[in-house]
Image (cartoon, helix red, strand yellow):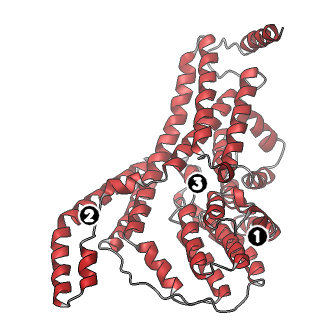
Amino acid sequence: MFKKILLILLLSCISATAWASGHGSIDLTNSIFGFTALILFSIAYLLVIGEDVIHLRKSKPVLVAAGVIWLIIGWVYTQNGVPLEAEEAFNHNLLEYAQLLLFLLVAMTYINAMEERGIFDGLRLWMVSKGLSLRSLFWVTGILAFAISSFANNLTTAMLMCAIILKVASKDKKFINIACINIVVAANAGGVFSPFGDITTLMIWQSGLVKFEQFIVLFIPSVVNFLVPAIIMSFFISNEKSTPVVSEAFQIKRGAKRIVALFVLTIATAVLCHSVVNMPPVLGMMMGLGYLKFFGFYLRMSLPRSLDKKRNKAEAENDAEALKKLGNIIPFDIFDKIARAEWDTLLFFYGVVMCVGGLGFMGYLSLVSEALYSNWSPTYANIAVGVLSAIVDNIPVVFAVLSMNPVMDLQQWLLVTMTAGVGGSLLSIGSAAGVALMGQTKGMYSFMGHLKWSWAIALGYAASIGVHFLING
């Protein structure tokens, strides 16, 4: 009996979605195929949210879900005699992901190269050695997280600042929790006013909806988003001195500053490619990877000469420790930096882009767009998008909005850029930075610890929206 009912459902779904004109997609929103795809995506995303508990890397469930969703689409379209339509839609979404992948791969390679050359370790050790008060440490790490995340991804920035907190106040659980909240809020806010600061900002810039220089108007609203909860939380932090930590001997490696300069040049190249000649920004980023590869070649070729010079100096000074370190130097390898990119994150993006793209092709994004942007004003819809990004990662949310492509002016596109970027700060699971710090602190920063301060973060969220409309019209 069950088999007969299932067969009738399948046949009715196919006939109901039959597509005769050859000029549009098949609506699967009320079919068993669409419902199956929705359930698959929901299960996959629940597994992603629970990554820190079940220790299943987030890329695995979304990769499988994306594959099954597009297999369903391919089968339905093949049965209706239009397989090329499904293939064309898949290739369109794949191209979107390919540009994002290569862009992020170059950015991650530069960040890994700067980390390997000791840029971030030098900053960390300098701060640790200062013996700042807990309140000063709270503010310094927050401000640095805000500033650095504008060009480095918020995950790397947050983990760097968290390492400083753990080094200085390893036994003060209360301070670590509130400092990590501040770091998460600051890192997410700092990524909003720069296309290089957050994946969602990058996606909106690459879509051509907002120009590179137009993002800067979000700077003041982003500052407000960070400052409001930070000021409130700072009143609950002791002003006692942290325990000074003796800084270990450290020196950044050869070429570190030049790699930073090359990264700035790469960003400029990407911006010029997009703004001047209307080519995708990824073209400039891949050129920038070439800059780094040439410089890596120079570092390798000049290494023997540099080692001989340092060895002669160490021998003249009878510095046995320096001679020992010179024997352990590993030549700069650009492919090692590429290999150390966050591949699980990059593959997770593939799964998200293809899942959301598949659901959109089935017709679900049209329904959501109708519900949000037709029944509500764009302002309320975009504020809701930010709140939703606290529960569901902002990447699929923003990709869904871009796929809907609602009719909005520049101020509204800037608003959704900001709300999606900072909305994830409302909960610890709302951003990659928050999830990473929960694992890094081994429970000292937790979901419930973050939730206690969500009201203050919500005040900053509301204030930043008000300031955006006050300043930007």
Q: How far, Cα to Cα, is label 2 from label 3?
A: 41 Å
Marks 2, 3: nearer the viewer: 2
Q: Is residue 286 left or right of residue 429?
A: left
Q: Quadrant of residue 331?
A: bottom left
Count residues near mark 1 (Cα–Cα under 10 Å), then give few for <14, some for 14-19, many for 20+: many
Q: What residue is shown with label 3?
A: 210
User: Label 2 amino acid?
Assistant: Pro
Q: Where is residue 196 in the image (x, y as percent from the top left)?
A: 52, 60
**Residue at the spot 46% in from the left edge and 86% down from the top edge:** 247
As rendered, which of 318 and 297 lies closer to the eye? 318
Amino acid type, mark 1: Gly
Give the CA distance from mark 3 to mark 1: 24 Å
Q: Pointer 2 and pointer 3: residues touching (CB < 8 Å)?
A: no
* Circle nearer the N terminus (2, 3): 3
The residue to which callout 1 is attached is 460
Please tell me in which quadrant of the rendered image residue 14 appears.
top right
Q: Is mark 3 on a helix, strand or loop?
A: loop
| Label annotation for residue 308 | none
Q: Earlier in the sequence, mark 3 or mark 1?
A: 3
Residue position for label 2: 331
Q: Are the two marked residues, 3 and 1, in contact with CB atoms closer than 8 angstroms?
A: no
User: Which amino acid, mark 3?
Assistant: Val
Q: Do the residues labelled 2 and 1 touch (CB within 8 Å)?
A: no
